[in-house]
Image (cartoon, coloured by chain):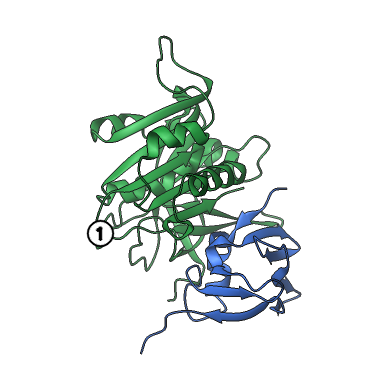
Chain colours: A blue, B green
Amino acid sequence: MTHLDGNAVAGDLAAIFTGDLSGAVATCAGCGVTGPVATVMVYEGMGEVLRCPDCDTVLLRLMRVAGETRLDMRGVSLLRWQSAA
Amino acid sequence: MAVTDWREATVARIRPETPRAATMTLEVPDWHGHRAGQHVDVRLTAEDGYRAQRRYSIASAPEGGAPQITVVEVDGGEVSPWMVSVAREEDRFEVRGPFGGWFVWEPAMLGEVLMIGGGSGLVPLMSMLRAGAPARLLVSARERDDVLYLDELEKRELDVTFTYTRRAPLGWTGYDRRVDYSMLREWAGTPGPRVYVCGPTAFVESVANDLVSLGHEAANIRTERFG
């Protein structure tokens, strides 16, 4: 199955963070590239896997198992977004 | 109720768009409108508890009260054939959203934008057009029967260019191939405007790469891939 992009996980991430992260800027811990979450590659299977569009590093894994949410963000070294003052 | 909460939506109206696509108007409790370009998450639960979750772009303009989604049947798909061919008015399923803060157009954005849609990638672009986005539009479809909103696109007197990748109408003198570098060089003009690109993943990546090769800044290219 082909990949989607970060727009596809806007709902799942909004349910975890306090708002929509599509326009939030992520820094890849693998190669240091920065870009909007909307532009990362998203693979769906057992949960969702977000990968860096430049170097393929796994940025984030999101899975729900037995009523528990598991979020692994080791590939995101920085995430920044506009928040209310 | 938060946008991230699942709500039970009722299908208020179904309108066929093409032989393989239909638009559903949804009554969603506690719906507070959307931004042009956003989508909703849809969740269907079978009697045995099996769940399938999908995303559908909103086609209607933001002011339009009950949101409309347009679903194109995917060959061998699990959910879309049900949505297009089986669903009836008064059916219910779960919806949450709207979502998306990046692939959106706002009236405050000044200036003409370019829009490039492949197949059902036209859906979020249609919401932007209905919201009044001043745009030039490039539509890639397999054949004329597959073009969503064709009557409305023609009535709106938009600057719209079609390319047919499988079968062009008789006597067609326009483009009849996949969107490529030379087509974009002719059509897109001088880099500068924001460009919205939506469609299948391979289509979006090839178009976005060609745009960058033509000198469009990556930051001006807004993409949405649907697989």
User: Relative to B79, is B31 on the left or the right?
Assistant: left
Q: Is residue B148 visible?
A: no
Q: Of B19 and B62, which appears nearest the observer?
A: B62
What residue appears at the point 56 percent right and 79 percent down from the top-left corner?
A79
Q: How crowded is mark 1: few (under 14 residues within 10 Å), some or many (20 or more)?
A: few
Q: Residue B122 location, x and y as percent? A: 43, 42
Asked if B98 appears above or below B191 in the picture, the reply is: below
Eyeballing the image, is B78 above or below A59?
above
Q: Which of A69 and B117 is in front in this view?
A: B117
Residue B191: % across, % down: 38, 48
User: Quick check: B141 above or below B125?
Assistant: above
x, y percent for residue A83 = 41, 84
Residue type at mark 1 is Pro
* Residue at position x 52%, y 31% in the image: B20
Q: Quadrant of residue B172?
A: top left
- Against A51, residue A19 (above or below) is below
Q: Position of residue B39 (x, y in %)?
A: 46, 57
Q: Name the residue under label 1.
A: B107
Residue at x 30% of width, y 60% of height: B106
Residue B205 seen: yes
Q: Which one is in front, B23 or B34? A: B34
Instruction: Say left or right for B101 vs A2.
Output: left
**How many callouts does the rendering have?**
1
Q: In this view, does A31 lie to the left or right of B205?
A: right
In the image as oriented, which residue stretches furthest toward the top?
Answer: B171
Q: Is residue B177 left or right of residue A54?
A: left
Q: Is mark 1 on a helix, strand or loop?
A: loop
Image quarter hosting the C terminus of chain A: bottom left
Q: Residue at x 52, y 46 (%)?
A: B213
Q: Mark 1 lies on which chain?
A: B
